[in-house]
Amino acid sequence: MKKVSVEINGKKVTKEIQDHTILSVFIRENLNLTGTHVGCDTSQCGACVVHVDGKSIKSCTALAADVNGSKITTIEGITKNGNMHPMQEAFKKLHGLQCGFCTPGMVMSAIDLLQNNKKPSDTEIREWLEGNICRCTGYQNIIAAVKEAASKM
Amino acid sequence: MKTFNYHSAKDVKEASKISSSSSAFLAGGMTTIPSIKLGLASYRDIIDIKGIKSLSGIKVSGKSVKIGSTTKHVEVANSKEVKKAIPSLAALAEGIGDPQVRNRGTIGGSVANNDPSADYPSACIALNAVIHTNSRKIEAEKFFKGMFETALKSGEIIEAIEFSIPEKSNYQKYPNPASRYAVVGVYVAKHKSEVNVAVTGAKSCVYNDKDLAKALSNNFSSSAVDAVRISSSGMNSDIHASAEYRANMVKVFAKKAVEAC
């Protein structure tokens, strides 16, 4: 067993976990934050994207023990005072989702893009989101939503 | 998922000391973790080396670019120094996987894993790299032994990879649409006294195509590539591409790389 301390969405937590606990499992089952989804579980689909120390990573392919001492942000941590994050607003307004399964990962990945590139072009958005797979929308509205959010953030 | 004991090593000595025949070193984990999850590998001990500060960082001198083994792909891709010294190496790093993979995956992990379709092994061959480990220095030509096989011994840790700065170079690949691994990738590098043409994805292990290298040493132009016959013998044939298709792609990408140099 390992003691893991992280700051998740601004809150400090310490949990005793098995050494081989995967980060996505830790977030969903130990911390009960089920907004982070697990789709393929093989780091292809991106539904499980969270931020660790400000950078987007796929939580299905990291060990919880390995992020000990880090600051983690999940989809639950981006709202402020009950208001949606501009990226969430834009996805809602422009129908950047249908079933919504991939959306937490899309939103977290897109926020990281705007941290690196404030005004991305369509191509840059498409290239950045190549690690996030949506099987509903065909991506057009997702790209539009990211552009909309970029203009608001 | 099979259980294991997780260790975070504070220095190379400690990491090497804990290692055994049933342990693995963990850097970015982009291959190791999926392999364990899929049941393709199991270990008693996982030794995390990411916390070892001396293994990370980029140093550029007049003749070489030395990159610490736990340096992430994103760091190589964004490094102003690498972009200036060997632009093709920064571009290669930018083309690995997706942003989340580049935020975690490391150069040392990629080289130690020696996946037949990985990008970095081709850079090592093309750029006459020297692999620095905790016990010796190994030339890239002697390092990559076969499919997922390297010259590394049990307990040996890659500390850094040192690339020679070429006169000019370029890397071209056809990325698998799902994984972005190279279905075929060709890294051409023109050094003062030689040309290397490293090919990844085509065979079971990265290799330097001596015929293309010789032709380009005599005449560094895409027309020199035209005159070389690439045999499909020994090339991979799978659902992504036949051996004949790969053989043709080696030529196509060698030409593209030369033209982009």
Image: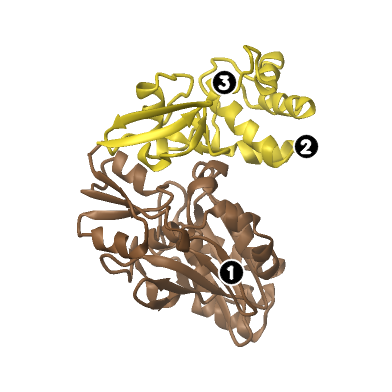
Chain colours: A yellow, B brown
Residue B114, image x, y percentages: 40, 61
Q: Can residue A135 be seen in this view?
A: no
> Do the residues bearing badges 2 and 1 touch, measured as CB atoms within 8 Å?
no
Q: Mark 3 lies on which chain?
A: A
Kindly state the secondary structure of the residue where label 3 is placed.
Answer: loop
Tell me which residue sits at (46%, 48%) in the image.
B240
Residue at the extreme top of the image, as rendered: A82
Tell me which residue sits at (66%, 14%) in the image.
A92
Disc 1 residue type (three-letter) = Lys
Name the quadrant of the C terminus of chain B: bottom right
| Quadrant of residue A134 within the rendered picture | top right
| Mark-to-mark CA distance, 1 and 3 | 45 Å
| Mark-to-mark CA distance, 2 and 1 | 31 Å
Q: Which of marks 2 and 3 is nearer the N terminus?
A: 2
Whether labels 2 and 1 belong to a single chain: the reply is: no
Kindly state the secondary structure of the residue where label 1 is placed.
Answer: strand
Q: Which chain carries label 1?
A: B
- How many discs mark residues in the rendered view? 3
In the rendered structure, the answer to whether residue A124 lies left or right of residue B137 reads right
Residue B158, image x, y percentages: 40, 66
> Do the residues bearing badges 1 and 3 touch, measured as CB atoms within 8 Å?
no
Which numbered mark, 2 or 3, is in the foreground of this view? 2
Neighbour class for label 3 at 10 Å: few (<14), some, many (≥20)?
few
Tell me which residue sits at (62%, 56%) in the image.
B77
Disc 3 residue type (three-letter) = Cys
Residue underneath mark 2? A119
Residue underneath mark 3? A136
Residue underneath mark 1? B59
Decide: is B17 above or below B211: above
Q: Can residue A51 be seen in this view?
A: yes
Which numbered mark, 1 or 3, is in the foreground of this view? 1
Disc 2 residue type (three-letter) = Lys
